[in-house]
Amino acid sequence: MYLFSYIPLSIFDLQGWLDYPTIYIWETHSAETILNNYRRFGEDQRISWQSRFDRWQEEQKSLPAITSKMTDWQQAEIMGFPEKYPRYDDCIHLAACSTGQFLPMSNPHLPADLFTSCLTTPIRTSLAFHLSHSEHRDEYPENILEMIPGNLAERRTVLGELNWIFTAITDTIAFTSIEREKFQNLFRQDLLLATLFRSFLLAQRVMSKFDVLPVSHPSLKDTSKHELWRCWDQTMDMVLDYCRELMYVKETRRALFCGRDVIMRSNVFPYLVLIDFENVISFNETLQYNTFFTEQLQAFELWLDYGVDEGQPPLQLPMVLQVLLSQAHRVRALRLLARFLDFGRWAIGYSLAVGIFPYVLKLLQSNISDLKISLAFIWAKILAVDPSCQIELFNECVDETASQKPSQQQQQQQQASHFLKPSMMFTNHPKVTMDVSGFF
């Protein structure tokens, strides 16, 4: 007797059950075939809806006025047609492989649902994949992945910083490889969607090692050969080496503690005073082991000094935005960002496209004096190119307690606002040369 049996499921029925918009993940052999059939059935649904809408209009005695510029769904909404327009093109599809390709299922060190694992647990899956293809795999303990300290939500921990670096690298790969509008829609408008598509870029890289090409709707170009993946490999090597050292130190501590009585009774005890155990006993798990963001800031500064190419942004621009989240590097990152914006309208346009706005808007709440001059200069540049940002700026800077006498702490917090509000008055003023050399 079989406990399981194959039950066919119609994509046409699935479309009706799940409605839209929906995110679909297809992990099966020749997964792109399902995506193509989904589009075909979606078109059938649209044609069927159009037919019912036309018959409904013929049955109505009076209808409100419409214009030829309206889309079908806008006309239906104004007329009061009770059925929703089938907008299946708004659905997101992530398929594990192209038509005619087979899923990789031969590596015992990787999960069977490798594509889904890349999307849902990208850090762990990436580490497991890296280990399985590493020439030094035998040098690491079998449980090395379970021994990585920290959690994904804490950037000050090893695992959290690794996730932070992954976000910076995949954001940069997307920004340098994908069309501007598509990047904004997929990586900047929705946090969940951005996280999913960052992981999809990883899936492209992982599955390509098995000669399999994942596909998506909206479609993304293949980024599996992007040069920044080498930086990700180097980062994972550093993490694995760090965790191996950490495990060794912990085991050494345990051995020193449990065997102290045996050691003291042994004949070699008098010679142990010649061995320096200080580094072992005082090992700090929070010690900085990764210089990724420091190196990226240095590369960005070198680009500003020697490699400026008008019309082409530096590779490190999306990473600089991630560095703004770090208090340790925030002042330097803002100053470098201000230097980049000073190159002109093209630099400001790239900065807005990569997503600078919410970062610098949030920093207005900071009371750190070292940030104020750079922030004021950055905002003056942004407003000169995009005056529509004035509303958000005023909402952030407005003093709701103007009728009350502010405390000394409140006065310090409002100083950034005092720098910015006058600059907005000159948004439409003729161009004025400004010497900012003293700011940096």
Image (cartoon, grey):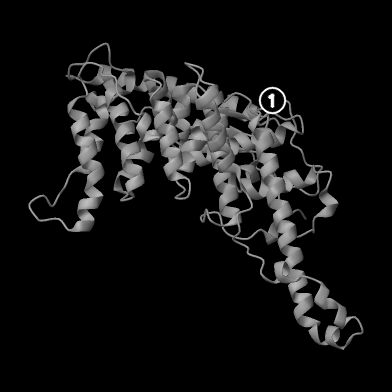
Q: In this rendering, is residue 253 above or below 145?
A: below
Residue ID for mark 1: 99
Quadrant in the rendering for residue 408: bottom left
Expressed as whole percent of the image width and height from the top left, the position of residue 216 reads: 57, 29
Q: Residue at x 90, y 80 (%)?
A: 268
* Camera-nearest residue between 124 and 242: 242
Query: What amino acid is labelled 1 in the image?
Result: Thr
> x, y percentage for residue 417?
22, 42
Q: Is residue 348 above or below residue 323?
A: above
Which of these two is toward me, 28 or 264? 264
Point 53% across, 31% down: residue: 300
Residue in view at x 47 percent, y 34 percent: 187
Which quarter of the figure is the N terminus placed in? bottom right
Residue 61, x across and y down, in percent = 18, 19
Left or right? Give the position of 394 relative to 8.
left
Vertical order, 435 against 439 (above or below): above
Q: Taking 402 as reference, is 360 left or right?
A: right
Pick the residue in front: 11 or 185.
Answer: 185
Question: Which residue ends up furthest to the top in the rendered image?
Answer: 68
Observer able to see residue 11: no
